[in-house]
Image: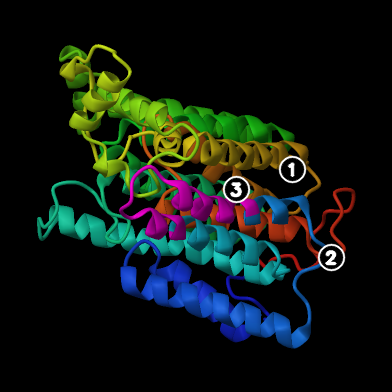
């Protein structure tokens, strides 16, 4: 498989995007610098060539509405603190999705960018393992720029799905060295999910493997059998080997605290939404919701208050409750619309046997991002900062390929297939 593009229309723009991806999970400052450089260079190139990526699409309207919604929420937020800064988070990852989708990225460039996306996570993972097991600077597996173990596990789960589908897509057309390396990388990411001690991420990884296997029935029965066998063996080894995550699960069950206080956190989120139903408390303001606020709000409605039923926290440990509390029904509705549009596009353009290897790999990466965002989002705050950028990159790669000039679902072969 050829890793580097044979030709690049905008080499500086491509370099800035590649560097953004490279530093995304590891270093904060370079990531922000290269995001700004990519956006500026993109517009300079498009104004110069008078080519902004073709006709306006439904996705364009949806992305612009999504970005604008953060600032509309900020203007009417119930709390005044970091709501305007919080709105910039949607701007950052929404702009990446929008620009990548409209870039008409060449097939060779997409292969390279997808490879860099996976490689950057592996490098960040190596640094995280070093900090955990060698220098002991951390007590849990974390990707430096992504941060908290739950958020790092979300990032790794998405990357695992992208790596798995890339491996499967190009397996038959690759040399033994690339096959061995891709299996090693995918297996390493799977092990990382186990040692991350994130129950949601591990569960999502196992289910994601099985779903990808079922989808791959369109291409190879042997692959499906292999994936199901590997999933069964991995789950068995994790359980009977009494890994730390298994012990964590058993401990939570024995202590009758399976959801680790999430019910109380969600109760507080619902009270914040009831107080500010239309626009919420504002993005990045969730941490300002306190039990005292909840008591006051319930007193205003002449309702009883039981302090043990509520818990304050930095975020709601749920994409849905967090969005409802921070952005109200307005922002929540737009988020759901984005997730539904994403799902509908994936379902409508489900890859067929005769689709190119690249199409399968890009579709798989986008599906992995959607599945992890929606699935883990029930128990953790997904679509947030670094893993939101990662998700939008993978969605953008696939949409860019899907909407490129000359592409047809009836004639889906790669014009520039990878070498072996």
Say if 207 sits above or below 51 in the image. Answer: above
Say if 389 sits above or below 30 in the image. Answer: above
Q: Position of residue 285 (x, y in %)?
A: 32, 46
Q: Which residue is mark 1?
A: 351
Say if 70 sits above or below 25 in the image. Answer: above
Image-quadrant location for residue 320: top left
Q: Which residue is mark 2?
A: 405
Q: Which residue is mark 3?
A: 366
Query: For this rendering, which residue is in front, 261 or 300?
Result: 300
> Circle 2: is it few (<14), some (14-19), or many (20+) Cα within 10 Å?
few
Q: Are marks 1 and 3 in contact (CB under 8 Å)?
A: no
Residue 287 placement, left or right of 366: left
Residue 139 placement, left or right of 362: left
> Circle 1: is it few (<14), some (14-19), or many (20+) Cα within 10 Å?
many
Identify which residue is drawn at 26% across, 43% down: 287
> Circle 3: is it few (<14), some (14-19), or many (20+) Cα within 10 Å?
many
**Quadrant in which the N terminus appears:** bottom right
Identify which residue is drawn at 53% across, 63% down: 115
Query: For this rendering, which residue is in front, 126 or 182?
Result: 126
Span of residues in magenta? 65-88
Q: Which badge, 1 or 3, comes first in the chain's sequence?
A: 1
Element type where label 3 sits in the image: helix
Identify which residue is drawn at 38% across, 53% down: 83
Q: Position of residue 134 (x, y in %)?
A: 12, 58
């Amino acid at each position: 498989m050829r890793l580097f593009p044979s030709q690049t229309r905008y080499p500086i723009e491509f370099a800035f995007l590649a560097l953004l991806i490279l530093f995304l999970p590891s270093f904060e400052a370079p990531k922000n610098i290269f995001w700004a450089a990519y956006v500026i260079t993109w517009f300079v190139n498009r104004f110069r060539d008078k080519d902004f990526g073709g006709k306006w699409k439904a996705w364009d309207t949806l992305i612009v509405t999504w970005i604008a919604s953060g600032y509309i929420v900020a203007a009417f937020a119930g709390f005044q603190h970091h709501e305007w800064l919080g709105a910039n988070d949607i701007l950052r990852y929404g702009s990446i999705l929008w620009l990548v989708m409209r870039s008409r990225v060449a097939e060779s460039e997409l292969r390279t960018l997808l490879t860099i996306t996976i490689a950057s996570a592996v490098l960040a993972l190596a640094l995280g393992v070093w900090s955990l097991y060698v220098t002991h600077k951390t007590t849990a597996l974390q990707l430096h720029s992504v941060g908290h173990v739950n958020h790092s596990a979300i990032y790794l789960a998405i990357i695992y799905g992208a790596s798995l589908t890339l491996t499967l897509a190009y397996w038959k057309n690759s040399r033994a060295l690339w096959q061995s390396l891709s299996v090693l990388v995918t297996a390493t990411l799977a092990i990382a999910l186990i040692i991350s001690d994130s129950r949601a991420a591990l569960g999502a990884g196992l289910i994601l493997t099985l779903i990808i296997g079922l989808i791959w029935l369109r291409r190879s029965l042997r692959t499906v059998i292999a994936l199901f066998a590997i999933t069964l063996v991995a789950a068995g080894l994790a359980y009977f080997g009494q890994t730390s995550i298994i012990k964590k699960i058993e401990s939570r069950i024995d202590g009758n605290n399976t959801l680790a206080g999430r019910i109380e956190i969600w109760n507080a989120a619902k009270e914040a939404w009831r107080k500010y139903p239309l626009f919420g408390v504002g993005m990045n303001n969730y941490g300002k919701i306190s039990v005292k606020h909840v008591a006051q709000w319930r007193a205003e409605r002449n309702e009883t208050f039981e302090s043990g039923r509520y818990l304050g926290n930095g975020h709601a440990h749920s994409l849905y409750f967090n969005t409802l509390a921070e952005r109200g029904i307005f922002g929540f509705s737009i988020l759901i619309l984005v997730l539904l549009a994403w799902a509908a596009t994936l379902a409508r353009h489900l890859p067929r046997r005769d689709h190119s290897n690249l199409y399968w790999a890009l579709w798989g990466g986008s599906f992995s991002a959607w599945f992890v965002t929606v699935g883990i989002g029930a128990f953790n705050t997904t679509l947030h900062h670094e893993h939101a950028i990662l998700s939008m990159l993978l969605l953008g790669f696939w949409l860019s390929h899907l909407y490129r000039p000359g592409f047809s679902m009836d004639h889906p072969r790669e014009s520039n297939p990878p070498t072996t």
